[in-house]
Image (cartoon, rainbow, N blue to C red):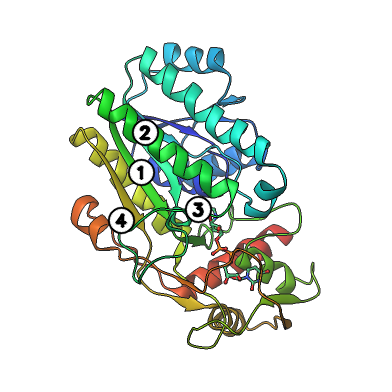
Amino acid sequence: MKVLVTGGTGFIGSHTCCVLLEEGHEVVVIDNFSNSSKEVAEKIKEISDRNITLYEGDVADKDLLRGIFANEKIDVVIHFAAYKAVGESVKLPLKYYRNNLGNTLSLLEVMDEYNCKRLVFSSSATVYGTPEALPIKESFPLSTTNPYGTTKLMIEQILKDLAKADPTWSIAILRYFNPIGAHPSGLIGENPNDIPNNLMPYIVKVANKELEILSIFGDDYDTKDGTGVRDYIHVMDLAKGHLKAIEKVMKETKIDCYNLGTGEGYSVLELVETFKKVNNIDVPYQIVSRRPGDIAACYADPSYALEELGFKAEKGIEEMCKDAYNFIIKNKE
Ligand code: WQD
């Protein structure tokens, strides 16, 4: 199949491109490199020993999109391109609504024009807000507490309304839990340019002595050791989940949502200690006050994705920690 991947040089997008290429699919990428770089496209080719077709530009640019659909016979689209920093979205909501919603509406309108109606959408477990129970099922109530999460929830609603109006759309909404790790080659991974918002990239920078100390946001939650519990999933497993999702939307015409998680919850302290052990490296940390908006615990019931997509995460927390650090070491060299 020929797959258009928006944001295909980003963290999850680049790993998904590698998996798609290794499966023998053709990959077309559109990316404005706002949170990545053109070099990642070269790394994808190096890893997969296959070429990708790369269009530099913005998903909001409908003429660029029309050119892609006119030149490339796209079978299915995976839509990653979005801003995703929770804290920044609180400070700059209009930037997030304009970009995340605007991109998606432009993409859907052009897909419709070219009668390409098979889509995999990158959503997030953040749409569950503070879960009513654990583990989290797809049928749970949805609510969000920040503009980033709200853009994901709004886009899910847009997609549901679209599929209702035109049932020839086939859409898989993937709700990611906490993606971490890196490709085992160490050639691609997560390496935010500025101070990381998320836990693992922060741990890695402290281990690599780029940052002095890790601040653990609260140890007074009602969890196993008082620190926040999350469902960390290896980015390579997450990438494989997208492969299953495009197969699903090609086979069955419907819209549905799927949790992509492991079903295992690990605390911040457990992740830090595992990272130190497997990489034999120190990660100095201090306990500070809670981060506003954080929830105590969040982990998936992954059974529906297994039932419907045949997807099950395989890599454990130790491999996630090893691969995350290996990426930084390889790139330091
Ligand atoms: C994980 C745990 C923090 C940083 C967010 C988004 C979500 C998705 C993944 C995009 C929490 C603690 C963190 C630090 C810490 N992103 N922490 N010190 O908040 O679960 O999810 O990223 O889709 O939408 O909401 O991930 O990695 O920021 O935090 O103690 O420096 O680590 O309190 O318990 P989160 P995270």
Q: Picture coordinates of residue 189 (x, y %)?
A: 58, 55
Q: Secondary structure at mark 2?
A: helix
Give residue 144's mark: 3
Q: Which residue is mark 2?
A: 159
Q: Residues within 10 Å of mark 4 (few under 14, many from 20)?
A: some
The residue shown at (36%, 17%) is 112
Can the viewer see residue 77 in this picture?
A: yes
Q: Please say if 54 is above or below 313.
A: above
Q: Earlier in the sequence, mark 1 or mark 4?
A: 4
State the image quarter where residue 200 is shown. Answer: bottom right
Q: Earlier in the sequence, mark 4 or mark 2?
A: 4
Q: Earlier in the sequence, mark 2 or mark 1?
A: 2
Q: CA distance from mark 1 to mark 3?
A: 17 Å
Q: Amino acid at mark 2?
A: Leu
Q: Which residue is mark 4?
A: 138
The residue shown at (48%, 49%) is 15
Q: Earlier in the sequence, mark 1 or mark 3?
A: 3
